[in-house]
Amino acid sequence: MGEQILNQIIWPIVYILCIVLPLVIAVAMYVWWERKVIGWMHVRMGPNKIGPFGLLQAFADVVKLLLKEVILPTSANKALYYLAPMIALVPALAAWAVIPFDDKMVLANVNAGLLYLLAMTSLGVYGIILAGWASNSRYALLGAMRSAAQVISYELAMGLCLVCVLVLSGSLNLTDIVHAQAGSKGIGDWFMWPLLPVFIIYFISGVAETNRAPFDVAEGESEIVAGFHVEYSGSAFALFFLAEYANMILVSFLASILFMGGWLSPLPASWGFLGHASVLWLFAKVFLFAFLFLWFRASFPRYRYDQIMRLGWKVFIPITIVWVLVAGCMKYFGWVTVGTGG
Amino acid sequence: MIDPQMFQLVCFYAFAAVTVVAALGVISLRNTVQAVLSLVLTFFSTACIWLLAEAEFLAIALIVVYVGAVMVLFLFVVMMLDINQERVREGFIKYLPVGIIVALVMLGEMLALIGVRAMHQAVMGADPAAAVGMSNTEWLGHALYTQFLLPFEIAALILTVGVVAAVVLTLRHRTGVRHQQASQQVRVKAASRIRVVKMAAEVPAAPQAEPGKETTP
């Protein structure tokens, strides 16, 4: 009986903590890295006062946010106002349940993993919409409206990108999708080559889905102050912040797993340690994508709202629909080798 | 100690209770945004019940399509509306008798249907997906794209026609609207925006002013 409780309740909780705690620390480090990188790109120093290289700046910010007062705006909808940050955060963390880090290292190796991810990422927008509505503020409502329209539009393109991946891999299981990208050609067997346009569209849609620059009209501080979270302060704001960065890291993980072979090594097997598939390769790829998010933010000016809609509906969706057909042909005529058998 | 069968039953009743309460909230809450949110909760707990029944594809599709997309648009519209609560309350009393009659007829029909089905087949057959050793999603895909391909494609076609019809019905051609042609904007060359004119340097006339006369203009 004791063993049953241990196996069914205690160990899963330990595993969940093993994912969530490093994730939260990764978010803190990511924020530090973002400020450093953008600082360097602007020929500034970035945070450099607290701790070595300013490394403790993120933790100082967390402590500051937690100590601040959470202010409730006048005639805001109290229940929804407090619920919204949690609704934003919960799907952002729940999605990590199906992310595989290695052949064996996965919390829940479910068969419909990709569908589950799609479901979880589509729930996050509720936090933003409710925050915008419950704040009883014009700016917040405008930000929520923009965010809702944008997320819905880019979710379609993103879903079609995922369809391309699962047509080639023949599985909704993320571990199987990585296995389908293994092969004798090493880096040449990754899905990023046959699905190159889809790969690019997927990552851009991911940037739009997380409301990051240059798609950050939901915040648009020059027009609507800070969008949906303008009325939030203290720990409630910190939850939105955490959800956004956790989602960015999630999109980076997904791009690595779906298109760049996950933990597979790009080097030939004869290279010893570097040639072996390992979780370090996954982290290296994730770091690349996470860096791209920051690079975009430092490089590109914000899109105009109508340009965002045009890009999503008139460019991305048609291209991905055509590429679903192309992927089907690749699979049917055997132009792409899937799995180690090829 | 934790009987899995028992636990599943408890979960089922818990989800079902949440579904019923949330569905009642949809029709009884005064605030329209709260009503839409209860509808979201109804869908979500229905998806949980379907997951218990091992219909994982349907459950997740319900969340992706209805909760993730349709209800977001609903919320989008409802937030924009400025609904007069008094008018809503008037309508509630006025249409209550009709509503009760419709509900009773529906209840009768559902009971009759359940009765007919119960008489014809005692229990549902074994799970067809488990029978062939496939996951629910995989089996559904096989069934839809082989056995039921034609009905499936016809349903897709009807939906597409519906979308096109909705767009055509609501499309208004307004005159005097200025559109930006993005392709033109992208293709624009520097030459079409600015014209560089070659001309000889204008040399000011040599100051041959007579002494004593002001030369500055």
Image (cartoon, rainbow, N blue to C red):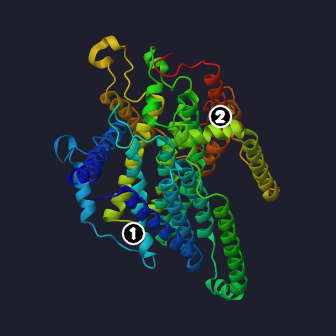
- Residue A248 shown left or right of residue B197 in the figure: left
Quadrant in the picture for residue A161: top right
Kind of element beneath mark 2:
helix
Q: Is residue B196 visible?
A: no
Residue A171 percent coordinates (x, y) = 52, 34
Verify CB contact (< 8 Å) between mark 1 and mark 2.
no
Q: Chain of mark 2?
A: A
Q: Specify which label sits upstream in the sequence, 1 or 2.
A: 1
Q: Which amino acid lies under the numbered mark 1 shown in the image of this protein?
A: Tyr
How far apart are the alpha carbons under marks 1 and 2?
Answer: 40 Å
Residue B198 position in % (x across, y down):
68, 26
Most foreground residue, B35 or A4: A4
Chain of the residue on which disc 1 is drawn = A
Left or right placement of residue A20 versus residue B78 in this view = left
Residue sitting at x 56%, y 38%:
B138
Residue A196, image x and y in percent?
A: 55, 27
Name which residue lies at 60% across and 18% down: A335
Q: How many marks?
A: 2
Q: Residue at x 62, y 23 (%)?
A: A330
Label drawn at residue B12:
none
Residue at the spot of label 1: A82
Q: Are marks 1 and 2 on the same chain?
A: yes
Residue lying furthest top: A270
| Residue appearing at x 54%, y 53% in the figure | B59
- Give the position of the N terminus of chain A as an image quadrant: bottom left
SS state under label 1: helix
Q: Is residue B41 above or below residue A312?
A: below
Between B114 and A193, the one nearer to me in the picture: B114
Q: Is residue B90 visible?
A: yes
State the residue position of label 2: A319
- Amino acid at circle 2: Ile
Query: From the viewer's perspective, is B97 left or right of A37?
Result: right
